[in-house]
Amino acid sequence: MGSQELQKLKAEHEKTLKMFIDRDIDLRQTNKKLEQEQKENKKTIKMLIQRDIQFRQINERLEAMDREKSQFISIAAHQLRTPLTAIKWLTQILQKDTQKNPHNPQKEQINKLNEIVQKVVNLVGDILNVSRIEEGRFGLKYSKASLGSLLKDILKTVEVSARSRKITIKKNIGPKLPESEFDPEKMHLALANIIDNAIKYTPTKGTVNIKATKKDSQITITISDTGIGIPKEDHGRLFDKFYRGNNALKQETEGTGLGLFITHNIIKAHSGTINFDSRKGVGTTFTITLPITQSSWPPRKKFYS
């Protein structure tokens, strides 16, 4: 073997050796990096576990505070009911006196006082209902009754309000609607909330349509209006507690954002559905379907949360 060949072999050997050495150095550095990353990952995991424990503890404290708040509100609302009932009774007596004497100079103030007291009574009632829903104490007492008659009774209570704003109420309530099983008091509250809203958020000279029909084993109620509508960005939160759309707030109409939350829960508790279709500036249509017969019949009470 000549000297040139030896030199060539030596160069190749040195090149191969250098390559292995470089690879070994790279592997050592990579291994060192991985070990460092592993240490950092362990620290991160430990920190995340500690944070998760802290968040759980904070969440538990917040839930406890929320329960305490709800209990306090419920107790306060209960305590307010008795004096409010007495105040309402007194204002109604005063109002009857003004009706006997139409020239009473205090007639307008008494009527306004009665209106304010009724709003406070309604607010306290809503707070109590929300508290009962959240605590699972909102009992349903089923009976066989007519949803058509219930709707007509509600319409009688809103006629004055609608007439004062020149809002036309059109009703198409099927005369042959069968009696169905529901809680009359709770269902009155649920449907009245939607009808009140329809009138409240419909401009002067607008129209509110109420329709009730039977199909198969269900009764469908639609309540539509030519009101301000609900912006698309508010659709997903419409049934949330205390939520009111931005355009509703701009209307400067009174409201707590509890009505539809309560209505939604009442309809669900009756194994029904409630959906809506709405366009801002055009109007809103609520569609409610309710079974004629409740599957849990004949038990008188059904609790839900």
Image (cartoon, grey):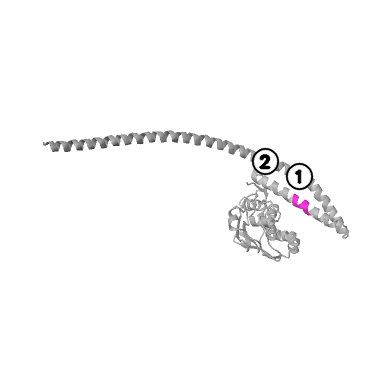
Q: Is residue 138 visible?
A: no
- Of circles 2 and 1, the one toward us is 2
In the rendered structure, which amino acid carries the disc numbered 2? Answer: Lys
The answer to whether one can see residue 44 in this image is: yes
Residue, disc 2? 69
Give coordinates of residue 109: x percent, y percent: 83, 55
Image disc number at residue 80: 1
Q: Residues within 10 Å of mark 2 (few under 14, many from 20)?
A: few
Q: Is residue 215 left or right of residue 106?
A: left
For residue 62, the mark is none
- x, y percent for residue 204: 71, 64
Residue at 12% over, 36% down: 3
In which quadrant will I find the N terminus? top left
Q: Is residue 5 magenta?
A: no
Among the two numbered marks 2 and 1 on one chain, the one whose residue lies closer to the N terminus: 2
| Residue at 59% in and 37% down | 58
Which residue is the extreme one toward the left?
1
The residue sitting at 47% across, 36% down in the picture is: 44
Judge by depth and name the residue closer to the eye, 158 or 69.
Answer: 69
Q: Position of residue 63 (x, y in %)?
A: 61, 39
Q: Give the range drawn in magenta.
A: 115-120
Left or right for 97, reference 264: right
Q: In this view, does 279 lie above or below 75?
A: below
Relative height, residue 67 to residue 291 (above, below): above
On the rendered structure, is 289 left or right of 127? left
Does 38 appear above or below 280?
above
**Which residue is nearer to you in this view: 229 or 277?**
229
Secondary structure, mark 1, is helix
